[in-house]
């Protein structure tokens, strides 16, 4: 998942739901938890300032890119902070304080103009890269420019800067001076950046937390090859052994100064990531102590979940927070063009079976709308496509098929990420449900690393291969309706490749409401606009919500300082350490 893919939720409900199902927490488990289930959702578990050792990660999928300018997976953003410092950051504390913004490279939070079109921020002096050279404001300006204005060189990352900066067309890879004419960000001196936006944007500081603000000197950039050895601004650097699809190992960066960094504890001597490991193997090795963290961050797979639920001795090692993410199915509007045909899918879907594909109660709550409950403007009690026991309304589905001239049903292809067992099971449940009204679904699996770049997010591939459906997951880039859903529902977010508005929803009324929200300073007024958008997206039947998910996460006794960070929808990687000889 993006993501990027990257929570912002009230975390207290997960424990009571899970303990009710399991009969209460058992003793045993984490060394500091005394058997307390879900402690890491609200507290730091096994706190320690012990340094040294190797922190061992594993993951099944590959990076979309190790380049901070070209990534949108949430786990990738979290992990890349080991070697990529950003202008701002989310507060590295558990609970409600986790959503607060704090400076990282910056001295303080940015200062806006009265109309929220101009934002000024200063960075700390004396910050250094791994080679000992100083980080400057121009390096951050260039990093943002190359990530957003690159002539199509990069397609994976978010485009907030490209959307909002008051900037004419530009390509840093054309001409002798990459920044000539790039005037939407001024650098009046080596430590000041001034951002000029097209329109008012009161939520702009949230964009400055993203890894695209990690500095890149012009002379260090190698375009697409930069991902092979990113120049570190953080406490760790590539150790020279990076193999895409296999491993990324990090070692200490001797030029990082911990006194300047309020985000990263940098406790381990080394950080090692294994890539391409089967999820069931990851789960087994996690529980046996052979690895410390599943980098994907979304919890154990279905097989291990069942095993852990039945084992009372490990309840103190488990956390079960709401992630703040929505698991859903895109209904691709260029392929299934008639809204009545899309609504037939909404009515025919068996939400109960898809919910069970995510593990039932410990896996999350059935979703009937777009915005997660903790996002202002969400209306989780709204359901435009109700059915008895959430099993689907086949009569209504048939009526909609009649309306769109497909009374005998139709066929289409459903794209799914091969590495996600939950996604695959969701697809299988939907296929079975739709067959009841003669909608014939063929499931096709694709690698997660290229899912949006080459397959479900590629307009040409979707059209050439009749992909009418795809399974996705999405979490907020920051805790608002805009930060959650604009990139998956605004027509301006549609891209030829690397498209995360995968349904290609381009509704003028929805687009207009998003644009109004940018100009609306009052949070309550914005929340009302987001509520209207939520309803309209459901009426358009471009997104079939499945689950507001929870993760069942196992943490070992050796893992220190683990707590759930809703901003990344997983543990905050930066404070983690290991306590072993």
Image (tube, rainbow, N blue to C red):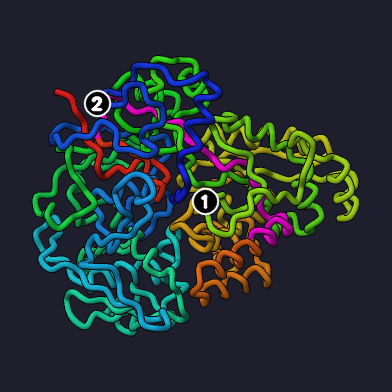
Can residue 486 be seen at all in this image of the molecule?
yes
Which residue lies under the disc numbered 1? 374
> CA gap, disc 2 to disc 1?
32 Å
The magenta stretch is 534-560
Q: Position of residue 53 (x, y in %)?
A: 16, 31
Residue in view at x 27 percent, y 64 percent: 87
Q: Is residue 406 above or below residue 390?
A: below
Instruction: Answer left or right for 470 relative to 5.
Output: right
Residue 548 is a magenta residue:
yes
Q: Earlier in the sequence, mark 2 or mark 1?
A: 1
Of badges 2 and 1, the one in the foreground is: 1
Nearest to the observer: residue 246 or residue 6: 6
Residue in view at x 38 percent, y 54 percent: 99
Which residue lies under the disc numbered 2? 558
Query: Which quadrant is home to the C terminus?
Result: top left
Q: Is residue 517 above or below residue 487?
A: below
Q: Residues within 10 Å of mark 1 (few under 14, many from 20)?
A: some
Q: Position of residue 219 (x, y in %)?
A: 20, 68
Q: Position of residue 64 (x, y in %)?
A: 41, 49
């Amino acid at each position: 998942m993006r993501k990027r893919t990257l929570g912002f939720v009230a975390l207290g409900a997960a424990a009571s739901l899970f303990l009710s199902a399991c009969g209460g927490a058992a003793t045993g488990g984490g060394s500091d938890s005394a058997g307390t289930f879900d402690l890491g959702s609200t507290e730091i578990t096994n706190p320690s300032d012990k340094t040294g050792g190797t922190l061992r990660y594993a993951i099944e999928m590959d990076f979309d890119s190790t380049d901070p300018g070209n990534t949108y997976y949430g786990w990738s953003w979290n992990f890349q902070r080991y070697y990529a410092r950003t202008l701002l950051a989310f507060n590295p504390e558990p609970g409600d304080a986790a959503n607060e913004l704090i400076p990282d490279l910056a001295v303080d939070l940015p200062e806006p103009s009265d109309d929220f079109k101009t934002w000024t921020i200063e960075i700390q002096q004396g910050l250094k890269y791994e080679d000992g050279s100083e980080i400057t404001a121009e390096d951050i300006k260039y990093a943002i420019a190359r990530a957003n204005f690159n002539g199509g060189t990069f397609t994976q990352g978010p485009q907030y800067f490209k959307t909002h900066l008051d900037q004419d067309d530009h390509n840093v890879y054309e001409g002798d001076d990459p920044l000539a004419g790039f005037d939407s960000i001024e650098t009046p001196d080596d430590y000041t950046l001034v951002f000029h936006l097209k329109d008012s944007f009161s939520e702009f500081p949230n964009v400055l937390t993203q890894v695209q603000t990690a500095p890149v000197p012009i002379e260090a950039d190698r375009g697409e090859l930069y991902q092979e050895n990113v120049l570190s601004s953080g406490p760790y650097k590539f150790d020279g052994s990076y193999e895409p699809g296999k491993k990324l190992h990090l070692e200490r960066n001797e030029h990082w100064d911990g006194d300047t960094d309020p985000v990263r504890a940098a406790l381990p001597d080394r950080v090692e990531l294994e890539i391409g490991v089967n999820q069931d193997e990851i789960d087994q090795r996690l529980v046996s102590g052979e690895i410390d963290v599943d980098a994907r961050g979304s919890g154990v797979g279905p097989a291990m979940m069942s095993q852990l639920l039945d084992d009372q001795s490990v309840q103190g090692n488990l956390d079960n927070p709401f992630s703040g993410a929505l698991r859903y199915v895109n209904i691709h509007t260029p392929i299934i063009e008639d809204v009545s045909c899309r609504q037939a899918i909404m009515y025919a879907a068996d939400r109960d079976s898809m919910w069970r594909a995510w593990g039932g109660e410990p896996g999350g709550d059935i979703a009937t709308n777009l915005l997660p409950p903790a996002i202002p403007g969400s209306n989780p009690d709204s359901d435009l496509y109700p059915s008895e026991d959430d099993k689907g309304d086949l009569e209504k589905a048939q009526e909609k098929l009649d309306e769109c001239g497909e009374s005998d049903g139709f066929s289409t292809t459903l794209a799914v990420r091969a590495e996600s067992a939950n996604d695959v099971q969701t697809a299988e449940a939907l296929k079975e449900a739709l067959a009841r009204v003669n909608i014939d679904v063929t499931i096709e699996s694709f690698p997660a690393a290229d899912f949006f770049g080459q397959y479900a997010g590629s307009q040409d591939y979707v059209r050439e291969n009749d992909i009418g459906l795809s399974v996705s997951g999405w979490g907020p880039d920051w805790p608002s309706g805009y930060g959650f859903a604009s990139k998956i529902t605004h027509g301006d977010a549609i891209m030829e490749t690397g498209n995360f508005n995968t349904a290609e929803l381009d509704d003028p009324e929805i687009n207009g409401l998003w644009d109004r929200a940018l100009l609306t300073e009052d949070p309550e007024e914005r929340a009302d606009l987001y509520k209207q958008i939520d309803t309209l997206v459901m009426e358009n039947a471009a997104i079939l919500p499945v689950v507001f998910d929870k993760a069942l996460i196992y943490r070992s006794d050796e893992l220190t300082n683990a707590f759930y960070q809703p901003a990344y929808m997983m543990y905050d990687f930066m404070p983690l350490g290991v306590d072993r000889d």
